[in-house]
């Protein structure tokens, strides 16, 4: 993502919202598009989207904060997502999650203070037979042990 000024961001968000507002149920696609293009859904984006859709600000805010998919602050340069759903938990995903939090010094949904890594939990990556599953910058990995996690992190940093 490139750095944008506040004014440019408002214009871009307005253009995204206007471009998608005729969809059926446009709010989620708009929020996804803003996050994809601008890295996160900022608090200042919410009134712009609400205005374009003729919705209450509180309504847009409620949806943007309800879904874990949307982050309210810029993410790290690398995003690590660890599956915490049932099948992966049965083969050590909880321990892997604890290891990742300890190793990075952040909780799920947080970014390391140097801005390098954002750690997220997800609930199923569609790789259940090869748990514990993790995704590093969109790339899926299976049978991720703590040692393998460290190696993946080393490659990504
Ligand atoms: S339960 Fe972890 S990938 Fe499906």
Image: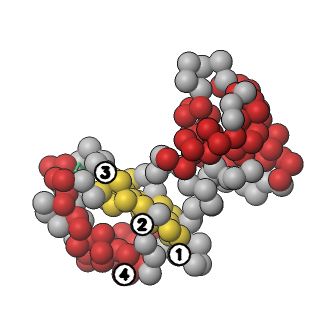
> At which x and y percent is residue 118?
49, 66
Specify the quadrant of the image occupied by residue 16: top right
Q: Which mark is residue 112?
A: 1
Image position of 50 (left or right of 11)? left
Q: CA distance from mark 3 to mark 1?
A: 22 Å
> Which residue corresponds to the image point at 59% horizontal and 78% vertical from the top-left?
114
Measure the alpha-carbon separation of dots 4 and 2: 11 Å
Give percent across and percent down for residue 52: 75, 29
Name the residue located 61 percent from the left edge and 56 percent from the top edge.
72
Q: Earlier in the sequence, mark 4 or mark 1?
A: 4
Q: Nearer the viewer, residue 78 or 8?
A: 8
Describe the element under mark 4 as helix, strand or loop: helix
> Of the numbered discs in the image, which one, if any, rests on residue 102?
4
**Mark sitting earlier along the chain (3/1):** 1
In this view, the residue in front, 48 or 61, is: 61
Q: Mark 4 packing: few (<14 Cα in 10 Å), some, or many (20+)?
A: few
> Does 93 appear above or below 59?
below
Rendered location of residue 104, percent (x, y): 43, 78
Residue that label 3 marks: 123
Q: How is the image coloured?
A: secondary structure
**Which comes before the other along the chain, label 3 or label 2?**
2
User: Is 136 displayed left or right of 3 in the figure?
Assistant: left
């Amino acid at each position: 993502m490139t750095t944008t000024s506040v004014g440019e961001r408002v214009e871009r968000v307005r253009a995204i919202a206007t471009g998608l507002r005729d969809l059926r149920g446009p709010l989620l696609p708009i929020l996804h598009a803003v996050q994809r293009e601008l890295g996160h859904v900022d608090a200042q984006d919410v009134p712009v989207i609400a205005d374009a859709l003729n919705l209450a600000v509180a309504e847009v805010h409620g949806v943007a904060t309800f879904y874990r998919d949307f982050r309210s602050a810029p993410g790290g340069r690398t995003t690590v997502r660890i599956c915490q759903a049932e099948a992966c938990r049965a083969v050590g995903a909880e321990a892997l999650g604890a290891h990742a939090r300890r190793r990075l010094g952040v909780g799920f949904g947080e970014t390391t203070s140097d801005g390098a890594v954002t750690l997220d939990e997800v609930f199923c990556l569609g790789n259940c037979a090869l748990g514990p599953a993790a995704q590093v910058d969109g790339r899926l990995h299976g049978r991720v042990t703590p040692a393998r996690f460290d190696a993946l992190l080393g490659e990504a940093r």
